[in-house]
Image (cartoon, helix red, strand yellow):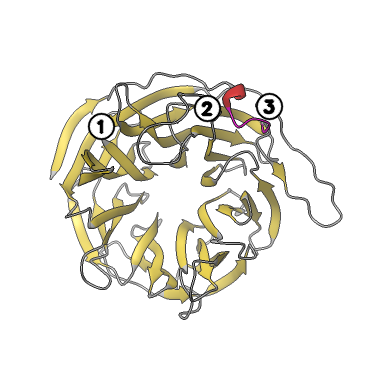
Amino acid sequence: MITKLAPTHVPSLVLCALALSACEPGSLSLGHDDPTDGDTETDTDGDPATEGEVRWSTLRPDATAFDLAVAPDGSFYLLGFLGLHPAGDGHYYDQLWLGKHDADGGLLWELTEPSGVDASVFPVAVTTDPLGNVYFSTVGYDESVDGDNRVRKLDANGNELWSISMPGRASALAGLPEGGVIVGGSQDSLAWVQPVDPDGNLGWSRTFGDPNMRYSEVTAVSVTADGGVAVGGRLGIDPGSSRSQAWAATLERLDGATRWETLVTDAIATDRIHDQGLAADGTLLLAGWGDAPWVKALATNGSEQWTWINDAAPGTYRLAVFPDGGFAVGDGLYLDPEDPNGCWEGPGPCPVAMRISRLEADRSTRWSLYREDCRSADHLRPTADGGLLATATCELDGGGLGVGVFRLEP
């Protein structure tokens, strides 16, 4: 069901910075460059120079967002679940939810549908194309072997244009310049990527990895300015465990031919790429995990330019990349375990506080934002004016959880 609303704002979050002293004791540095052979390790940043400035923030109670997409006109979409209900020791959501918001955070319209018994229909990824259409993917976890895995296209007003069944689970989407979408995910234990044209027709298909191993998948997709598709993910290396190597590749958008591909870690554990983005010069930035959380920069030929290690946080899962090569990372910092208010009741990591940091192209810190009422940043997207949109799971006054959305100044 699509509900269309006049632009309105949900209640504003109370803004409060988390003092640096409340972050992980003994680790105030934001990160450092990983030295190459023959180099001396250099700490590129210390205490943040400034606190991130929030233009506005909103909170949607009883909702969770699994992805965030920004449209060409500055409006944005949240895809996730709605309708939080407690259930025994946990909770569940009873509706799939896609909400369109204006550039100031006001809700314009929302699509809600039953999510199935035990959330058997799971929302995964959302993106837009330059024409203003929106695409989102769902994975069906029903009794069939692969479930009903779908990609759906809506116009900017929420009218569905098509819905197609996909031959794999779509974990990542990227809108194409001419309309249509690139889909990345997993198919029969292989990393998989495939385009869909503006009319919903499937194009070429590529798979990567060893079918005898486990957990190969594409987790991030980007469209390059020179007619390519950049993909990142992981390749499984063990038939009996989840061990994998973080992996990236660039393909031709026309036919899927490989330009280059590379392994970027040594399979310490479940090494993978969580997020990625492109600078204006074609540099591909990747956020992932090996033996520590990192951001890596790859040149247009796939060679590694630098690695930035985030040694102050348990994970760097979200990344936004700006045209000049600067980037923002979203993560969580452990609070002082002696703080009686530092640990929340309910599911999720505990104790942890959200941190979002904006870095320059040289990895020095422009600003950081800390929020002790929110968990680690869930999604980051750059805005046309150099600002940042971010989502997080945040605590409600009086208890409960909701989706917090933050619009940060450049």
Q: Nearer the viewer, residue 165 or 273?
A: 273
Would you name the residue on which mark 1 appears?
107
Q: Nearer the viewer, mark 1 or mark 2?
A: 2
How far apart in space, not on screen, are marks 1 and 2 (Cα)? 26 Å
- The residue lying at 23 percent from left, 43 percent from top is 88
Question: Could you tell me the amino acid type at mark 3?
Answer: Asp
Label annotation for residue 300: none
Question: Are circles 2 and 3 on residues that touch, CB within 8 Å?
Answer: no
Question: Could you tell me the amino acid type at mark 1?
Answer: Leu
| Residue situated furthest left in the rendering | 1
Q: Position of residue 35 (x, y in %)?
A: 78, 51
Would you name the residue on which mark 2 appears?
370
Q: Is residue 175 visible?
A: no
- The residue lying at 37 percent from left, 67 percent from top is 195
Would you name the residue on which mark 3 appears?
47
Residue 257 among those drawn in magenta = no
How far apart in space, not on screen, are marks 2 and 3 (Cα)? 13 Å
- The image quadrant where one finds the N terminus is top left
Q: Position of residue 359 (x, y in %)?
A: 62, 36
Mark 3 surroundings: few (<14), some (14-19) or many (≥20) residues within 10 A: few
Q: Position of residue 209 (x, y in %)?
A: 50, 75
Question: Are circles 1 and 3 on residues that touch, CB within 8 Å?
Answer: no
Question: Could you tell me the amino acid type at mark 2?
Answer: Tyr
| Residue situated furthest right in the rendering | 38
- The residue lying at 29 percent from left, 31 percent from top is 60
- Examine the rendered structure and indicate whether residue 12 appears above or below residue 109: above
Residue stretch rendered in magenta on the structure: 23-27
- Left/right placement of residue 408 relative to residue 188 reads right
Assign a secondary structure to mark 2.
strand
Assign a secondary structure to mark 1.
strand
Q: Position of residue 281 (x, y in %)?
A: 62, 51
